[in-house]
Amino acid sequence: MTEPTQAQAQAATTEDARLGILARRRIEAEIIKPIYEIMKREFGAERAQAVIAEAVRGAAVDAGRTFAAQEPDGTSVKSFVALQVLWEKDDALDVEVQRVDDAHYDYDVHRCSYAEMYHAMGLGEIGHLLSCARDSYFIQGYDPRIALTRTSTIMQGGQRCDFRYRLQETAQAGTQGAGDAA
């Protein structure tokens, strides 16, 4: 995977801002659904899901790097929080913020249009791969100093999604996160 150029990063983040992540995920899911159905028929559900998971993982890390490349002052918890409007656009999430500071971003999602959409499309069995699993990989690409802990998702039957982002400065001592200035 290569680092995106400034122009590529600008184009990608502008498109996400215009479209919104929910609309983007719907378009992706419409393409992925028939591919997944064929892979499931040909290779079985377990292998088909593993392929989807691997592809989404790489795309999420790349997306994180692309967004990081757009941060003029480098990445931080604060810059990450500012991106959340893209995921919430089109009334996609009902969010209750628990804590926001320089080292933490904690929030709970009580309604998730992503989960509703995947279930309505008949993709409930892989919705967690298409959206939920992206979150930890996106943040790795965006800033590897920030870690996500989540114990529950609506997509997989939970009452809420509990997002707990932490800046892990000591765990990454001596390294720079994606988008950090040299």
Image (cartoon, rainbow, N blue to C red):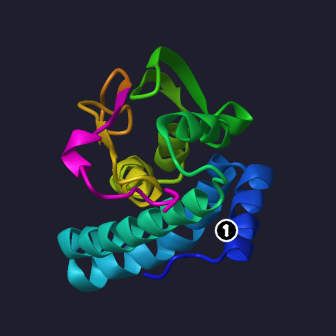
- In the displayed structure image, the side of residue 107 where residue 31 appears, left or right: right
What residue sits 27% from the left and 30% below the top?
A: 152
Q: Is residue 60 left or right of residue 151?
A: right
Q: Is residue 122 magenta?
A: no
Q: How many marks?
A: 1
Residue type at tag 1? Ala
Q: Whole-percent x and y of residue 99?
A: 44, 16
Span highlighted in magenta in the image: 162-182
Residue drawn at (76%, 53%), measured in percent from left and top? Answer: 19
Residue 164 is covered by the magenta coloring = yes
Camera-nearest residue between 91 and 123:
91
Asked which quadrant contains residue 56, the reply is bottom left
Q: Secondary structure at mark 1?
A: helix
**Residue of label 1:** 9
**Residue name at image x 49 percent, y 49 percent:** 118
Residue situated in front as seen by the camera: 169 or 80:
169
